[in-house]
Amino acid sequence: TLILENEGIHYTCLLMLAAYDLATPEQQISITSTVDSTCDFFLMLNEIGKDDYECKYHLLRGELYRVQGRSFEALDEYELALSSAKNFKLMQWEAIINEQMAKLWLKLNKDRYVAGHIQAAFVLYQQWEATAKTRRLEEKYRQFLSPFHVIMSRTSPTMSRDDNNNSTKYRPLPRTNSLVGSTTIQNIELKTVLKVAQAISSETTFEKFLSNMMKIMMENAGAQKGTFIVCSGSNKDLLIEAEVFVSHEGYWNTEVLQSIPLSNYLKVPQSIIHYVKRTKEAVIAGYAAKDQRYNYDDYLVSNNVRSMLCLPIMLMGGSLNNNNDVKAILYLENNSVVNLFTEDRVE
């Protein structure tokens, strides 16, 4: 289930900081104030022992110092965030923090510190199965990764990590740019954050913003078709607000702000969407048309839908909203690949 709670506040602050250089001076003041308040809130939550907000606090504080030009203070905060991420085994944040540290050291022309962090990030992204990300790191930071191709797998006999001297064994980097693998739900990494920030800053109408956001989500999930459904009014009527799909020729086709009642819209599996709204649970299928749990739906069978993901979007807890009703539903599908959306990564 996608819950826009305190985790959502964290991501929102990271988005604002990613867009900081694109903001006006007035907007930058607002971003600084918002992130400062959020840092104080996370610090309080951590001190009272409510989950682990230590990593979130130090990462946000480090990002704030970075955009303010306080580079070495930012690096100190990154180090604290990295220590917390390791302690709580937050692999994705450990990868992102290492990458941010590498970028900052590179900006400071301290190349000798870049390699260790970018190699660590590469290793962690591989373990996280963020294949597209490792490919981009290989392209962008090849001089720091070569002559090492980091093969880091806890079960691989060709790789090992010596916890006593904190060293990692590497394998030579191949000449071809051929890292491949499956797309997972959590392959939405830093480049996506930057894309979202650009979408927010560059679009003046909600229609264009929604269209761009749908494209970004679909690109990173590997979906061929996406539909955004909102629960509207006191009766929580389901309305289709956006549909985006990729044509056979590879072109994007978008229709937004249609507000079409779900009952009048035959391009999605209505029974699945009603189920998600009612149960507030995500639905994933590797081959939906042949899955006995879902093949009662005419749309899935007649369109031979393979990979399917249907996510509820809610506001819950904190100061955002105390009502945990489903606010919207995101439906994604891919009819070329099976098992694209992996169940173990949705949460």
Image (cartoon, helix red, strand yellow):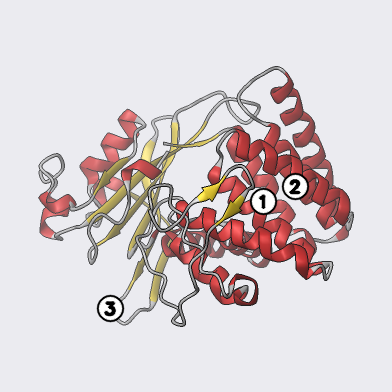
Q: Residues within 10 Å of mark 1 (few under 14, many from 20)?
A: many
Q: Is residue 61 left or right of residue 187?
A: right
Q: For mark 3, what is the residue?
A: 248
Mark number displayed over residue 202: none
| Residue 22 visible to the viewer | no
Query: Label 2 sits on what residue type?
Result: Tyr
Check if mark 1's residue and mark 2's residue have beta carbons within 8 Å. Answer: yes
Q: Residue at x 79, y 31 (%)?
A: 40
Mark number displayed over residue 78: 2
Q: Residues within 10 Å of mark 2 (few under 14, many from 20)?
A: many
- In this rendering, the answer to whether 140 lies above or below 68 is below
Q: Is residue 340 left or right of residue 31?
A: left
Residue at disc 2, secondary structure: helix
Quarter of the picture containing the N terminus is top left
Query: Label 1 sits on what residue type?
Result: Ile
Q: For mark 1, what is the residue?
A: 97
Q: How far apart, in angstroms, are the residues tagged by discs 3 and 1?
A: 38 Å
Q: Position of residue 107 (x, y in %)?
A: 80, 68
Query: Label 3 sits on what residue type?
Result: His
